[in-house]
Image (cartoon, rainbow, N blue to C red):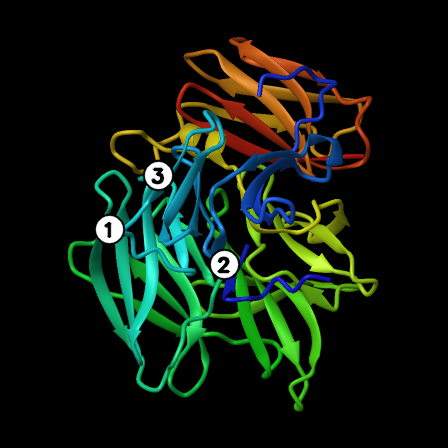
Amino acid sequence: MRKLLYTLFIGLTLNASAQAQIKLIGASYNTSTGNIELLQWSAFDSSSVTATPTESDAYLFSSSAFDPFNGNYYIASVSGQTTGLYSYNTDSGESSLTTGSMNTNIAEFDMSRSKMYNLIMETEGYISIYEYDLELNEDTLIGTIYEPGVIGIVADAIGFDSNNGILYYAGYTNDPALALYAVPVRDEVFSFTRTILNTPNANSNIGSVNFDNVNEKLFAANDTYDQNGNSTGRNIVEIDITTGDVITLEQLTGFPYFVGGSSLFDQNSGTFMLVGITTDGMLEMIAFDTYTNTYTSGFVPDNVSEIACDNTQFAQNRYAAISGVEQQPTVSFNVYPNPASDVLNLECTTVEPVQVQIFSSMGKLVYEKQNVSVNRLNIDLSTLSTGHYTVNLTSAKQTVSKKVLVK
């Protein structure tokens, strides 16, 4: 099997019967052309894969980032003698390679402002945090964290709270100890807090950090080891951003290895995803439902990494285009009974038509009704399987959600 952990790798408008899934995009090496191509697909749907060739020869490991506000996928790329930030718009298909950016393999987007934040260790012991303006192609140093003795930064260990403008990074202190750094990047004066993480296992590592902007929770992968440094498993965990407690939600069994830089989070369904390698050496996409703390696994395209989730619809519905901050909901609703069986009653307060959608725990669209202007709607659930579902109401500017259990 091709190793995926090199630092530099070379060369909804649907009806109720449709199965819209979580939209994904990643990079893959095309052995025929020697170049990188971008793959787009719906989660677990092998028939939905499309490939877009690029002129890139290589990319930096764990350097992909997705800007949900504009629908752009970014990756630190090499094309011939040119290096820079490659961008691809998942709607229009437009692409470009911008030189001059300090984009690293520890980057994350504020999805409400279309700003990228990069962590760089330019000097040993100093973690510099840069804000990158995509339109101006300018990096601005917003502050530096001093950790004497620390010689590197953990890749794929940052998440962004777009509601409050806080960048989270799980890394090491000079003790060494695992800590959660929280940086409010919108403040005029640079500051940060450092909270020591209380992991269930003393021999641990935290990675694959993702922030849930609906429930304002931080999720991650916790790798554990024995006293000899041998892996004893990987757990999906929630990190308490106040206390630093690391709460184990579930252990991922049957996957002795995982693809680096493959974690992502679907904001609409609350699904934490990453790619595992089975004992047979096969790649499988793992989808962990953070509402039920259960997971399933299945198809992922061969030879793909640097996977990101297309949260464009979520970001454009949830955040204001001008102010860049979370809007107060313009609609509110209740659903009952919950748990439900045959019929779900939905009552909403709205001054404008809304779109009603129901998604399964795997992100499949199982119900949709456009231009709902009534205050009460009776939804037939008789065709749905038992499980947890997300009910979304979308107005012109907002999406609000509730979870429902169908029995």
Name the spot of residue 133 as percent of width and height, x first. Answer: 25, 45
Name the disc covering residue 296, or none: none
- Mark pair 1, 2: CA separation: 25 Å
> Does any portion of residue 172 appear in the rendered image?
yes
Identity of the residue drawn at 71% across and 20% down: 18
Q: Is the residue under label 3 in contact with that under label 2 (CB below 8 Å)?
A: no
- The residue lying toward the viewer, choosing from 7 and 380, is 7
Q: Split into 4 quadrants, where in the image is the N terminus?
A: bottom right
Identity of the residue drawn at 50% across and 54% down: 210
Q: Residues within 10 Å of mark 1 (few under 14, many from 20)?
A: few
- Between disc 1 and disc 3, whose residue precedes? 3
Is residue 170 depicted above or below 23 in this figure? below
Identify the secondary structure beneath mark 3. Answer: loop
- Mark pair 2, 3: CA separation: 22 Å
Q: Which label lies toward us, 2 or 3?
A: 2
Q: Residue furthest left?
A: 188
Identity of the residue drawn at 46% across and 45% down: 213
Residue of label 3: 112
Amino acid at dot 1: Arg
Amino acid at dot 3: Ser
Identity of the residue drawn at 66% across and 32% down: 21
Which quadrant holds residue 142? Answer: bottom left
Is residue 215 depicted above or below 106 in this figure? above
> Does any portion of residue 24 appear in the rendered image?
no
Residue of label 2: 62
Name the spot of residue 384 as percent of width and height, x first. Answer: 79, 27
Name the disc covering residue 186, or none: 1
Q: Residues within 10 Å of mark 2 (few under 14, many from 20)?
A: many
- Between disc 2 and disc 3, whose residue precedes? 2
Q: Which label lies toward us, 1 or 2?
A: 2
- 52 vs 175, left or right, is right
Name the spot of residue 10 as percent of width and height, x first. Answer: 53, 58
